[in-house]
Image: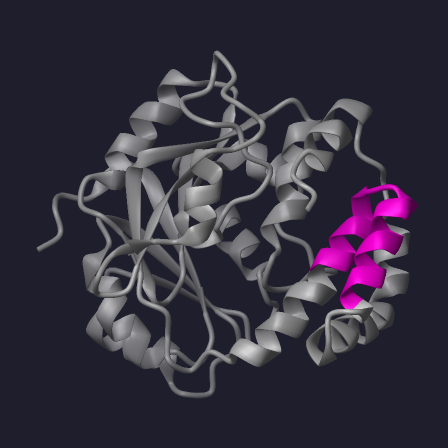
Amino acid sequence: MPGPPSRRVTVVVATRDRRDDLARSLPRHEAHVILVDNGSTDGSPEFVREHFPQVEVIELGRNMGAPARNVGVLRARTPYVAFADDDSWWASGALDRAAEVLDACPRLAVLAGRVLVGEDGRPDPICEEMAVSRLGTEPDLPGPSVLGFLACGAVVRRDAYLAAGGFDDVVFFFGEEERLAVDLAAGGWGLAYVEEVVAHHHPSPSRDPRGRQALAVRNALLTAVLRRPWPVVAAGALAALRGGPAGRRGVRDAVRRLPAALARRRLLPPPVEAARSLLDP
């Protein structure tokens, strides 16, 4: 059973056509939940209002992708916001502990928690990478520095998140975390992996693995166009083109969004680009 609700953290969940997943995850949250619905057609908003009246529901009427979370963050009134997917939730006590860490570390904008996947609770590989980050640990941060994170395992400082623009509609969805992470770092904020703060993720069976491979390529290229030097963009595009059908599809899809990315292109400050380059393959 969930513990008492956190008073310092709001959980923002963005969803689309995942009513069954919401039925499983919503009862497990230990904070006020703002559910932002991306134009569901399966009756999710009505279902949540009927069965979980304590959940605040915002219907967008269309699919805004990851930027839907921005709407939830704007509505939140707590200093910290935890993100969750419709198929994830935070472990008991995790949000109160996250608030304590954020209170103690005023430069920390993103607390990246440990995400345990599936019934067997195996750590997500990305968390294993963050735990041994090449960026080291800064003295005023509570764990290894990172320049990326899993949204469903992140607690953010609301004001810093909004000042950095939140998630954007160029990347739209999947891999949307990196652009926000580097922009926060460019603004002087810290991002750190904190292993003791745990989230659970039970991926929905409705996911499309092949489609996500192409999406990952597309969004990595778009993020590079938005913030990184042209040689980095070129190297990424070439590697993707050599990577098979998913890579070629990803490049093609990125080209369609290139005008929007170019309009918002802004190179990172040299220290942030140097740190980001340490994480390149």
- With respect to residue 198, does 124 lie above or below? below
In the image, 219 versus 18, the foreground residue is: 219
> In the figure, is residue 137 to the left or right of 20?
right
Residue at the (37%, 75%) spot, across then down: 204
Rendering quarter of residue 100: top left
Residue at the (47%, 76%) spot, across then down: 16
Which residue is at the far bottom? Answer: 42
- Is the N terminus in the top left, top right, bottom left or bottom right quadrant? bottom left
Whole-percent x, y for residue 239 in the image: 79, 61
Whole-percent x, y for residue 250 in the image: 74, 72
Whole-percent x, y for residue 120 in the image: 21, 62
- With respect to residue 1, does 82 lie above or below? above
Which residue is at the far top? Answer: 139
Q: Is residue 230 magenta?
A: yes
Q: Is residue 33 magenta?
A: no
Please state the extent of the stretch shown in magenta in the rendering: 220-240
Whole-percent x, y for residue 201 in the image: 33, 60
Rendering quarter of residue 273: top right
Residue at the (58%, 79%) spot, across then down: 210
Query: Does residue 36 appear in the picture of this structure?
Result: yes
> In the figure, is residue 119 to the left or right of 127?
left
> In the figure, is residue 220 to the left or right of 205?
right
- With respect to residue 227, does 122 lie above or below? below
Residue at the (54%, 70%) spot, across then down: 60
Query: Does residue 63 appear in the picture of this structure?
Result: no
- With respect to residue 182, does 153 lie above or below? below
